[in-house]
Structure formats: structure tokens, C-alpha cells
Amino acid sequence: MRVLVVGGAGYIGSHTVYELIKDQQEVIILDNLSSGYMELVHPEAKFYHGDIRNKSDIENVFKQEKIDVVMHFAAKIIVPESVKEPLEYYYNNVEGVRILLEVMNDFGCKKIVFSSTAAVYGEASGICKEDMPTKPINPYGETKLATEKMIQWVANAYGFHYVIFRYFNVAGADKSLKIGLMKDQLTHLIPVAIQGILGIRDHLTIYGNDYPTKDGTCIRDYIHVSDLAYAHVLGAHYLLNGGSSEIMNLGSNSGFTVLEVAQAVNEIAPLKYVIGDRRDGDPAELIASNEKARQILNWVPKYTLKDIVLSDYQYRKKISKK
Ligand code: UFG
């Protein structure tokens, strides 16, 4: 199959491209490089520089390439930034996809695998199932939910088929260590803790230890980026084999507290941590039910928390030497 990966130079996009190429698929990337990097682009993928908010940039790709299925990763994803700049988030995350869908419809390409997020569940605590009510608590989650709904209405009107994946806490790096999370400003728990053991930062601050959990710190469901990426390969095959439209969580069915993650990192090298105040908007516990992805796609995550943490460590150590 010929897959257009929009945002294929970013963290999750690049890992998906690697998995698609391992699966011997043809990959075309469209990326504006606003938060992606050319060094994450797989050498066998065809690269177009462009922005999905410019209709002509997408048309340019469709005029030159026959595309069977589109995958979309080109979103802004930083929750506090979305609170400060909601219009920018709606413009990029919703309007960008609206234009993409318009061009796909014009060219008769009607299959899409879309990246959504656990943030659509909002404050929901516990095990999240796809049919639970969605109540985002920040503009980032709202833009993803709005786009999920837009895709559903477009599917209804023009005969599109979609797989919408709701990601839980993604981390780690491809085992080749050629690609990984490259951002300068890291905020997520695992890379921040890893920076703590690499001496890039002095310590990890744990945001609150008075939550109603076993050790008082928040519980999250961590998923290896390569497991997540591979689900997209399965999702694309599913659509091309005539699968019906579905929304599916991508997580591991299990959760770890922040202290347990810190402990896993501490097993690699000593990690200093301090307990700080709670961070705004953090639910106590978020765990994915992944039964649906298991049943429909036969997807089973194969990496453990230990693998996730170790691969991020190895990648971060590698890039810190550059
Ligand atoms: N945490 C710390 N210290 C840090 C960083 C994080 O204690 O330096 C804690 C957080 O308070 C939270 C947990 O570690 O309890 C995980 O935090 P992350 O920032 O790594 O991830 P989030 O759970 O906040 O965010 C993830 C995705 C978002 C998505 C959200 C949905 O990255 O894109 O889940 O709940 F919106």
C-alpha cells in the first residue's frame, strides 16, 4: 500500500514510518518541519515539505502520488500551550485536518488513520473504555475531540472509513536508536526522569504525592512508541481490507505510579527526586482498556515499562553526545 504520513518527521510519525517500511509499504511524508526533524525521516520514504493548512501543498502531493491511505500526526500537543494559544490549536489541529479531508475527498482517497488522545476523556479516572463519555478539560483535548467528530461526519457524508486511535502515555525509542523524542523542551515524565540520571537536569520533581492511589502519586498507562506505531500499520491494513470505521484506545491495560516509573529509571542509574505541588489538570489515574484494539486488530503491546525506560535512556544518551 501507499501511505501518506502527514507529520512523518515528528516523534510518533517517524516511528510509524519505520514500522511501515519494515512492513514493506511505500511511504510518502508531508511535514512542515515545525516540530519535526529531517534526521528523523527514513531514507526510503519520499519527503514533501509542506503545511496541511495550505491546500495547494496537499494537492501537490496528491497530484504526484497515488495514495491508498492517509495517516495524520501533524498536531500540536502541548497541553499548557493549548490553554495559552487556543486559536493556534484550533487552526492547526482542526482546520488543518479539515483541509486535508477536503483534498482527500477531491482526489477520491477516503481512508484515514487519525491520532487522537486520552485527553478526550478529561478528568475520567480509572480504566477508560472507548464508549465512555468524552469531556476534555483543555483546548488540546477539545481540538482532538472536535476533529474526531469532524472525521465521523465526513465519513457519514462522503463514504470515508477511519481508524481513530486514542493514545495514552507514549514513550521510548526505536530499537535502532536512529529515531526518538528529540525535542529541546521536554515535559513528559519518562524523558525528564532520564535527563535526571544523565546529569542534564539535577532532579525530577514529582507533581504531588497526595492523590488517592497506592503511593499517593498519579497512575498512568505507558506504551512504547514502537508498539503504538505498529498499531497504525495494522490499522491501515484493516481499512484496506474493508474494515469498518472504529475508535480504539492504544494503551497497555495496566498502570504505573509516578514513583514506580522513578524507581524503574533509578534501576538504570541513581535518580534524585523531590516532591512538589500538584500540577493543574492531572487526573489521579488514567488506564486504557485495550480490549478493542486486541480484538479488532489483534494488536498486543510487546514492550514493558522497563523496555520503554531503557530505550529512552539509550536514545537520550546517544543524542546527548552529539
Ligand atoms: N510528572 C511528574 N513530573 C514531571 C513530569 C510529569 O511528576 O516532571 C507526572 C505528571 O504529574 C503525571 C505523570 O507524571 O502524573 C505523567 O505526566 P506526563 O506529563 O508524562 O503525561 P500526561 O499524563 O500529563 O500526558 C499524557 C499525554 C498528553 C495527553 C494526556 C492525557 O502526553 O498528550 O496524557 O491525559 F493529553
Image (cartoon, rainbow, N blue to C red):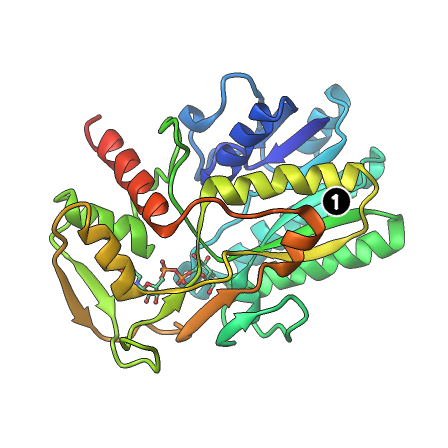
**110 to 283, vertically: above or below:** above
Q: Is residue 230 visible?
A: yes
Name the residue nearer the viewer: 170 or 51: 170
Instruction: Determine which residue is flagged by label 1.
Output: 101
- Residue at 38% x, 36% y is 180
Q: Quadrant of the C terminus?
A: top left
- Residue at 38% x, 68% y is 219
- Horizontal and vertical percent for residue 39? 40, 24
Q: Quadrant of the N terminus?
A: top right
Q: Secondary structure at mark 1?
A: helix
Taking the view exactly as shown, the residue that stands out farthest to the top is 44
Q: Is residue 22 left or right of residue 71?
A: left
- Horizontal and vertical percent for residue 138? 49, 69
Image quarter of residue 150: bottom right
Name the residue nearer the viewer: 292 or 137: 292
- Horizontal and vertical percent for residue 119? 52, 65
Q: Is residue 122 visible?
A: no
Q: Is residue 73 left or right of residue 107?
A: left
Image quarter of residue 261: bottom left
Q: Is residue 142 left or right of residue 192?
A: right
- Horizontal and vertical percent for residue 317? 22, 34
Ligand 1: quadrant of the figure: bottom left
**242 to 149, vertically: above or below:** above
Q: Is label 1 within 8 A of ligand 1 (CB to nearest ligand atom)?
A: no
What amino acid type should be assigned to the residue bearing mark 1? Answer: Leu
Image quarter of residue 46: top right
Q: Residues within 10 Å of mark 1 (few under 14, many from 20)?
A: many
Name the residue nearer the viewer: 238 or 245: 238
- Residue at 73% x, 30% y is 59
